[in-house]
Image (cartoon, rainbow, N blue to C red):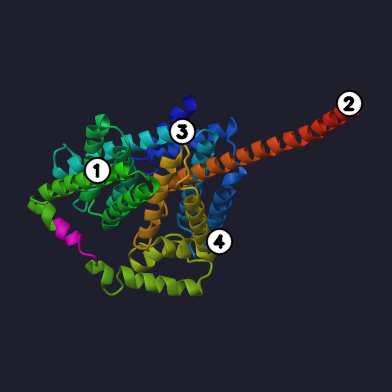
C-alpha cells in the first residue's frame, strides 16, 4: 500500500514542472532507487522497451562525440536516460500489480485538474500573481511551456470522457465539470498541437468504443453522450470567444500555417534542411545543436532523433514506436481488467506520435509515463497468456498421465473377468 501510494504521489508531481530539476525527478530518483534495492523486477516481457531505449540513448552519447565543445549536453542525455528509466519503472510496477493503474490514473487526473485551474485562472487574471502560470499570453499552468501543458491534459480528459460513456449518471456531473476544466485548459494553452491531439483522441475513443460495444442501446448512449459533450464544449468555447483578447489570440493561433512555419528558414524549411543534414551526419550533430545553429529547435520528434541521437537513435526510436503500437493494437480490445487503461493510454500515445511531426516530445515526462503504462499492460497480457498456456499444458499432462492408468485398469478388470 505504501509503495503504491508513493507511485501515485510521484505521478501527481508530474503536473508541476515550473523549474528543473522538478520535484517529479527528485522524488522518482529516490523512489526508483529504493524500489531497486528492495526488489524491482524487470521481466522479459518489457525487454524491447528496455533494449531500444538504451540503444536510443547510446546514440545520443555517440552524437556528443561529434561536438567540438561538449557544453551541457551530457546532462541532457542523462535526463533522457533517466526518463527512459521512469518508463521502464512504470511498466515493471504495473506488470507486478495491475491495481496500480487505477491509482496512477487518479493521481494524474488530480494533478491535471489542479494545473489546468492554475492555467485558466492565471490566464483570466483571476489569481494574484497568476502571470507565473502564463507565457506569451497563453496558459501554461504549472509547466514551463504551453505546448507541453496542453497535451498533458489530454489523457485525463479522455479518462473522464470514458467514465461518462461507461459510468453511472450519479457521477456524471463531476466528470462533466472536470472535463470542461481540462478542455478549457487545452483551449487556453492555444497550442495547435494540443487542440489537434484532443480532437483526434476523442474521435478515436468514440470510434473504438462503438467497435467494442456491440449492443444497440450502449452504442446509442455513446452517441447521445458524445453529442451532449460536444455541445457543452462548443458552448464553453463560444462563451470564451466573446472576450476580445481571447478571440484575437484564437483567430491568430487557429491558422493552420503560421508566419514562422512557412517563412524562409521557418519551421518547415528547417525540417527539410535538417533531414538533408542527417544524410551527412550519421552520428548526429549533438544534442540541442540544431536549435543553436538555426535559432529554433527542430519542432519534430523524428528530426530531433536524427540530429540529437544520430541514425542509431533514430532507428531504435522508430522501432520502439512501431513495436509498441503494433503490439498494443493486438491487445487493445481484449476483455481484461486493465483494458480501459490500455485503450486510453494507447490512443493518447498514438495521438502523440501523430503530432510528433510538428512538435518535439523528447523530454515530455508524461510521454514516458504513457509508454510505461502501455508496456505495463502489454506485459500483463503476456503474463495472462503465459498463465493460460501453462494451465492448458498442465491439464494436457494430467490427462495423458491418467489415460494409461485407465487403460491398465480396464485391462486388469478384463483379465479378472476372463
- 389 and 146: which is toward the camera: 389
Binning the other alpha carbons within 10 Å of mark 2 as few (below 14), some (14 to 19) or many (20 upward) gives few
- Dividing the picture into quadrants, the one containing residue 358 is bottom left
Label 2 or label 4, whichever lies nearer to me, is 2
Q: Which residues are magenta?
A: 249-256
Measured in 3D between alpha carbons, the distance from the residue under mark 1 to the one under mark 2, in whole angstroms, is 74 Å
Label 1 or label 3, whichever lies nearer to me, is 1
Measured in 3D between alpha carbons, the distance from the residue under mark 2 to the one under mark 4, in whole angstroms, is 83 Å
Residue 117, numbered circle:
none
Reading the image, the residue beneath label 1 is 225
Measured in 3D between alpha carbons, the distance from the residue under mark 1 to the one under mark 3, in whole angstroms, is 29 Å
Binning the other alpha carbons within 10 Å of mark 3 as few (below 14), some (14 to 19) or many (20 upward) gives many
> Looking at the image, is mark 2 or mark 4 earlier in the sequence?
4
Provide the secondary structure element on which disc 3 rests: helix
Label 3 or label 4, whichever lies nearer to me, is 3
Measured in 3D between alpha carbons, the distance from the residue under mark 2 to the one under mark 3, in whole angstroms, is 63 Å
Residue 100, numbered circle:
3
Q: Is residue 251 magenta?
A: yes
Residue 118 visible to the viewer: no
Residue 417, numbered circle:
2
Residue 338 visible to the viewer: yes
> Looking at the image, is mark 1 or mark 3 earlier in the sequence?
3
Provide the secondary structure element on which disc 2 rests: helix
**Residue 159 location, x and y as percent?**
34, 41
Measured in 3D between alpha carbons, the distance from the residue under mark 3 to the one under mark 4, in whole angstroms, is 37 Å
Label 4 or label 1, whichever lies nearer to me, is 1
> Looking at the image, is mark 4 or mark 1 earlier in the sequence?
4
Q: Are marks 1 and 3 in contact (CB under 8 Å)?
A: no
Which residue is the extreme one toward the front? Answer: 418
- Residue 284 as seen in the image, left or right of residue 157: right
Q: Are marks 2 and 4 in contact (CB under 8 Å)?
A: no
Reading the image, the residue beneath label 4 is 62
Amino acid at each position: 500500500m505504501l509503495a503504491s501510494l508513493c507511485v501515485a504521489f510521484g505521478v501527481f508531481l508530474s503536473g508541476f514542472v515550473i523549474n528543473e530539476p522538478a520535484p517529479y525527478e527528485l522524488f522518482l530518483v529516490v523512489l526508483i532507487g529504493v524500489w531497486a534495492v528492495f526488489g524491482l523486477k524487470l521481466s522479459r516481457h518489457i525487454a524491447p522497451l528496455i533494449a531500444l531505449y538504451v540503444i536510443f540513448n547510446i546514440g545520443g552519447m555517440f552524437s556528443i562525440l561529434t561536438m567540438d565543445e561538449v557544453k551541457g549536453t551530457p546532462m541532457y542525455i542523462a535526463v533522457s536516460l533517466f526518463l527512459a528509466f521512469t518508463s521502464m519503472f512504470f511498466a515493471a510496477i504495473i506488470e507486478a500489480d495491475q491495481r496500480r493503474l487505477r491509482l496512477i490514473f487518479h493521481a494524474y487526473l488530480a494533478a491535471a485538474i489542479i494545473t489546468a485551474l492554475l492555467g485558466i485562472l492565471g490566464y483570466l487574471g483571476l489569481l494574484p500573481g497568476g502571470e507565473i502560470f502564463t507565457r506569451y499570453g497563453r496558459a501554461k499552468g504549472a509547466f514551463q511551456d504551453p505546448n507541453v501543458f496542453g497535451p498533458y491534459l489530454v489523457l485525463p480528459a479522455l479518462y473522464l470522457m470514458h467514465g461518462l460513456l461507461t459510468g453511472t449518471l450519479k457521477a456524471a456531473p463531476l466528470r462533466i465539470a472536470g472535463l470542461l476544466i481540462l478542455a478549457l485548459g487545452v483551449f487556453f494553452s492555444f497550442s495547435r498541437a494540443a487542440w489537434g491531439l484532443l480532437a483526434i483522441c476523442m474521435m478515436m475513443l468514440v470510434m473504438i468504443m462503438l467497435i467494442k460495444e456491440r449492443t444497440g442501446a450502449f452504442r446509442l448512449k455513446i452517441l447521445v453522450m458524445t453529442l451532449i459533450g460536444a455541445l457543452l464544449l462548443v458552448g464553453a468555447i463560444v462563451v470564451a470567444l466573446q472576450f476580445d483578447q481571447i478571440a484575437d489570440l484564437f483567430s491568430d493561433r487557429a491558422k493552420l500555417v503560421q508566419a514562422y512555419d512557412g517563412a524562409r528558414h521557418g519551421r518547415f524549411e528547417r525540417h527539410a534542411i535538417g533531414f538533408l543534414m542527417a544524410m551527412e551526419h550519421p552520428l548526429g550533430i549533438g544534442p540541442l545543436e540544431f536549435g543553436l545553429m538555426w535559432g529554433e529547435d527542430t519542432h519534430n520528434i523524428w528530426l530531433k532523433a536524427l540530429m540529437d541521437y544520430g541514425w542509431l537513435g533514430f532507428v531504435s526510436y522508430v522501432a520502439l514506436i512501431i513495436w509498441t503500437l503494433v503490439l498494443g493494437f493486438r491487445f487493445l480490445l481484449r476483455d481484461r481488467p486493465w483494458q480501459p487503461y490500455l485503450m486510453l493510454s494507447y490512443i493518447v500515445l498514438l495521438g502523440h506520435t501523430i503530432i510528433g511531426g510538428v512538435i518535439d516530445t523528447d523530454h515530455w515526462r508524461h510521454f514516458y509515463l504513457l509508454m510505461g503504462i502501455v508496456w505495463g499492460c502489454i506485459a500483463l497480457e503476456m503474463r495472462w497468456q503465459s498463465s493460460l498456456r501453462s494451465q492448458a499444458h498442465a491439464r494436457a499432462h494430467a490427462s495423458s498421465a491418467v489415460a494409461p492408468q485407465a487403460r491398465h485398469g480396464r485391462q486388469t478388470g478384463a483379465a479378472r473377468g476372463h
